[in-house]
Amino acid sequence: MDASATPGIPLRSHTGTVYRFDPGALCLELLTTGGPGPFRRHEVLHAPADLAAWAERCRLTPTPQLQITDSEVADARRLRDALFRIALARTRDEPPAPDDLATLNEAAAHPPLTPAITPDGRRRWATPATGTQLLSTVARDAVDLLTGPLADRIRTCAAADCHLIYVDTSRPGRRRWCSMENCGNRHKVRTHRARRSQQD
């Protein structure tokens, strides 16, 4: 996994506030683009440019130069939906659906993005890079997460109206919110108001 200097992906709350959400893993950043079932209303992956824009926002550094086809965008949605269901199953201590695992494993089986170094010592990705390579990189990240020591720390935000999924990478393992800027702050405001109303 390649972490940027400021990990996380910018999101916009229902009130219009922009905040940074760090799900702790590249693969979970893909889940911010929509999802299966009721999450379809949040879909943002419609065209190759949309998947390229996500790649620019995610924690891959530097941003890979991608050649993406329409079929690879469909593959991205399929992988994301499978990963969404797998991650949710993990939070509920349930077994993932075999079809979803097959989708994840199929994506991971393709060659991933290839890192390279420039003459001046900077990191880059070998080009041309494809959408399939990007998805393989995401899928392999998911395999590492789901089979690694942090698999039991995959969680959903504690806010009743938020369904963002993250992995708690904090040392104490007590993270509750997708972001303290968003749901954590809303909880603090509600708690403060409740205390004041009890005192009045």
Image (cartoon, rainbow, N blue to C red):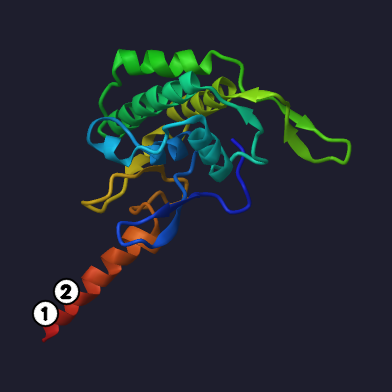
Q: Nearer the viewer, residue 118 or 2?
A: 118
Quarter that holds the C terminus = bottom left
Q: What residue is rendered at 46% in x and 25% in y? A: 73
Quickly name the residue at label 2: 194
Residue furthest out toward the right: 119
Q: Compared with residue 164, is residue 134 higher up or lower down, i.e. above or below?
A: above
* Secondary element at tag 1: helix
Q: What residue is rendered at 31% in x and 13% in y? A: 98
Q: Amino acid at mark 1?
A: Gln
Q: Nearer the viewer, residue 81 or 25?
A: 81
Q: Compared with residue 77, is residue 105 higher up or lower down, i.e. above or below?
A: above
Examine the image and state in which quarter residue 111 appears: top right
How many other residues sit within 10 Å of disc 2, few (<14), some (14-19) or many (≥20)?
few
* Mark 2 vs mark 1, CA separation in Å: 6 Å
Quickly name the residue at label 1: 198
Counting every numbered tag in the picture gives 2
The image position of residue 79, as x and y in percent, is 41, 24
Q: Is the Cβ of the residue at disc 2 closer than 8 Å to that at disc 1? A: yes
The answer to whether 172 appears left or right of 92 in the picture is right
Residue furthest out toward the bottom: 200
Q: Amino acid at mark 2?
A: Ala
